[in-house]
Amino acid sequence: MTHQFSPLTKEQKKELHEIALRIVSPGKGILAADESIGSMGKRLNQIGVENTEENRRLFRQVLFSADDRMDNCIGGVIFFHETLYQNSDDGAPFVKMIKDKGITIGIKVDKGVVPLPGTNGETTTQGLDGLSERCAQYKKDGADFAKWRCVMKISDTTPSNLCITENANVLARYASICQQHGIVPIVEPEILPDGDHDLKRCQFVTERVLAAVYKAMFEHHVYLEGTLLKPNMVTPGHSSPTKYSPEEIAMATVTALRRTVPPAVTGVTFLSGGQSEEEASIHLNAINNCMLVKPWALTFSFGRALQASALKTWRGQRENEAAATEEFIKRAEACTY
Ligand code: 13P
């Protein structure tokens, strides 16, 4: 029995469900701007910009200073810890800028991946220590949802049972801690697109992983209506010799979700996982047009697929800021449905 000892009051559940619904209200998705300092370093390096706190702030400002066209397609923005406490050039806190647009604030709370000894290079995600205290503080500082990312890879020997069970459990434990603090957890079990596997294999692995995640969520008494799932789309491996149409990818993705994700989950917000900006929006559109019955909102929580053109246009130059912001809005508008 899930709620035998009522981990949440009626009011807490109502708040969580309303936050989740707001983030994925029709036509809206999530801007994932929560790259860690290391990941931002990789992005800035591609455009020859030094990875300093100021440059990271300037690029986030390019995104957050978009006009009200952003409000129509973005329901939530995920921040990294540093960004939550930064201001725009004129001293306005980023949190206030985003909230004033009616957009919900999220925060990445995991602390990255660590090896699982005895596996073929597999990982789990750390960050449970002190998570309850950090969630309480982030809620006070304006965050209403959180993200925790686990990573799995497809090969002949992976993902292993250990990797699947460990990552499902840590995601469920994180989700239950967030909910105690009025924070909607985004549950992200990412299966990487590296490899030469075909679409069927990715679908099978995705089903196996999601089935384990929802078993663990049940056992941890997580209130599903107050959660969002952030999965990979079901795609062939990057080096797969076989290519598939957007309709085939959509059918495989929706089929995998229908078999494993309870209808009580409020929304599914896909990651872009290294797809090009165009591919990611075409696939999302095909997923929404798939004729199978879809009981959840299906939308985006893209990082690279919303930011790649903006980053290239910006190149760290003040005079490119406005044009870069336009590129971001263009991508966000291409993703709405
Ligand atoms: P991508 O869309 O670039 O995969 O990033 C989304 C994300 O937040 C991964 O955790």
Image: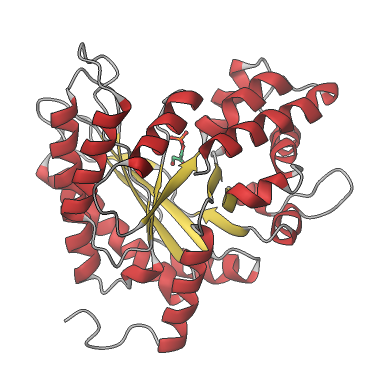
Residue drawn 75% across and 35% down? 58
- Above or below residue 184? Residue 257 is above
Residue drawn 21% across and 37% down? 252
Residue drawn 77% across and 43% down? 65
- Above or below residue 316? Residue 304 is below
Q: How is the image coloured?
A: secondary structure
Q: Where, quadrant-wise, is the N terminus in this rendering?
A: bottom left
- Residue 71 at x, y percent in the picture: 67, 52
In the image: residue 60, left or right of residue 291: right
Asked where in the image residue 322 lies, by quadrant, the reply is top right
- Residue 210 at x, y percent in the picture: 21, 50
Asked where in the image residue 326 lies, by quadrant, the reply is top right
| Residue 130 shows in this picture | no
Residue drawn 32% across and 63% down? 265
Instruction: Give whichever of 253, 274 is nearer the camera.
Output: 253
- Residue 231 at x, y percent in the picture: 33, 45
Which residue is the extreme one toward the top? Answer: 241
| Residue 11 shows in this picture | yes
- Residue 254 at x, y percent in the picture: 25, 44
- Above or below residue 206? Residue 142 is below
